[in-house]
Image: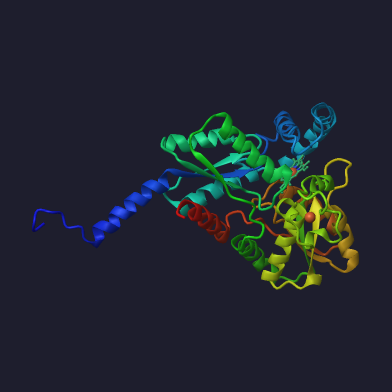
Amino acid sequence: MLSGKPVYNRLHLQQFRTSTNMEAVTDKGIILMNLGSPESTEVPDVKRYLMEFLMDKKVIDYPYLLRLLLVGGIIVPRRSPQSAEAYKRIWWPEGSPLVVLTKQLQAAVQDELQDIPVTIAMRYGNPSPQAAYDELLAKNPRLKEVILLPLYPHYAMSSYETAVDYAKAIHKRKKYKFKLTTIPPYYGNEDYIQAQAACMQPYLEQDYDHVLFSYHGVPERHIRKGDITKTHCLKVDDCCHVASPAHEFCYRHQVFHTSERVAAALNLPKEKWGISFQSRLGKEQWLLPYTASRLTELPAEGKKKLLVVCPAFVSDCLETLEEIGMEGKHSFLESGGESFTMIPCMNLHPMWVQAIGKWCRQLIQP
Ligand SMILES: C=CC1=C(C)c2cc3[nH]c(cc4nc(cc5[nH]c(cc1n2)c(C)c5CCC(=O)O)C(CCC(=O)O)=C4C)c(C)c3C=C
Ligand SMILES: [Fe+2]
Ligand SMILES: [Fe+2]
């Protein structure tokens, strides 16, 4: 200090900028939101979970009294003991795979984002979005913005939409002061496509005849209901490949798009892969073809060595580990299949963790 004035050299300026940026960054928080699981594999816990899940009017979209009668009187009493047994087959010592893997993903993303607090929320069960908001506020009472990442790559009324609407409704009802910003469906985002392809790549080294992309199904009626044009989905020939504003909310279009992009990234020839839809519930027509049917048909078509991947789920769960990995494998091998390999979900794949980190950083430091 020659003249009594402080000398702000480049290093000082750099530090000053960094500390101002850090303040701006740390008044943000991230929530990774998934579906949720029962608290335990005991029938009463599974019952409570299924009641909350299936009484959601965006999942079973019948008028309230009919829904209550159907869900509370028939589906849940019948299904709970079977579901509890299915959960028992896949349950881990630490809890439900979906919840454990979501917590592990949170820790990995936290490592990636360092000073920005990251937490999780579930649509059904715990932790609720309110608990997640309160956790972020406890870490920083001056919280200005929360970024919500639904752990669903595709838009469906019964998955992405209900999760986001629920988180928004709580944000509004409890009059939280921070802004809530939602990450849109990323089914066609290059980082998601590349991460999904990288996750599959090692499995393509083995001898296989066919890759089946199996997606959670939804009733066809939901696809028509979500059509903002009311004239396109399941009405126009090959609707999902004909340009339309309806695609923004069309689960079927979005899963086709993901599969085509991932197959292209992996150089999979057209005849080496296919799409099907799993987990049908009830008597309505769901998206076709059903995975359960394809698994019994494929061996007779000469596709005896099968790889199955489930890109609608980013974390392994009951539907991948039990329905596909156990039940599906059994029916494929019983039908003449020779080998069946379930490709795990992206879970903690470094490219997936980096993709989330990148999207969050882009929103935080525009
Ligand atoms: C892509 C995401 C999902 C969509 C779309 C979806 C629609 C949907 N699901 C049901 C009914 C059930 N799903 C169940 C489990 C389940 N579903 C998803 C995701 C989507 N569901 C996940 C990740 C899971 C696994 C949860 C876990 O704890 O691991 C179940 C419960 C299990 C069972 O009893 O089979 C039901 C029931 C409907 C009716 C629906 C669309 C209308
Ligand atoms: Fe489901
Ligand atoms: Fe469509």
Extreme residue in the right direction: 300
For residue 55, above or below residue 20: above
For residue 282, above or below residue 362: above
For image coordinates 87% across by 69% down, the residue present is 302
Image side of residue 118 versus residue 83, left or right: left
For image coordinates 71% across by 68% down, the residue present is 263
Image side of residue 149 versus residue 296, left or right: left
Classify the position of the N terminus by image quarter.
bottom left
Image side of residue 287 versus residue 173, left or right: right
Percent position of residue 352, x then y: 58, 58
Q: Is residue 90 visible?
A: no
Toward the viewer: 175 or 328? Answer: 175
Percent position of residue 329, x then y: 80, 55
Quarter of the displayed picture in which ligand 2 can be seen = top right
Toward the viewer: 298 or 250? Answer: 250
Toward the viewer: 230 or 221? Answer: 230
Q: Quadrant of residue 351?
A: bottom right
Percent position of residue 344, x then y: 67, 57
Q: How many marks?
A: 0
The coloring applied to the image is: rainbow
For image coordinates 66% across by 49% down, the residue present is 152
Q: Quadrant of residue 99?
A: top right
Toward the viewer: 92 or 144? Answer: 144
Percent position of residue 63, x then y: 81, 31
For residue 28, above or below residue 39: below
Q: Is residue 228 visible?
A: yes
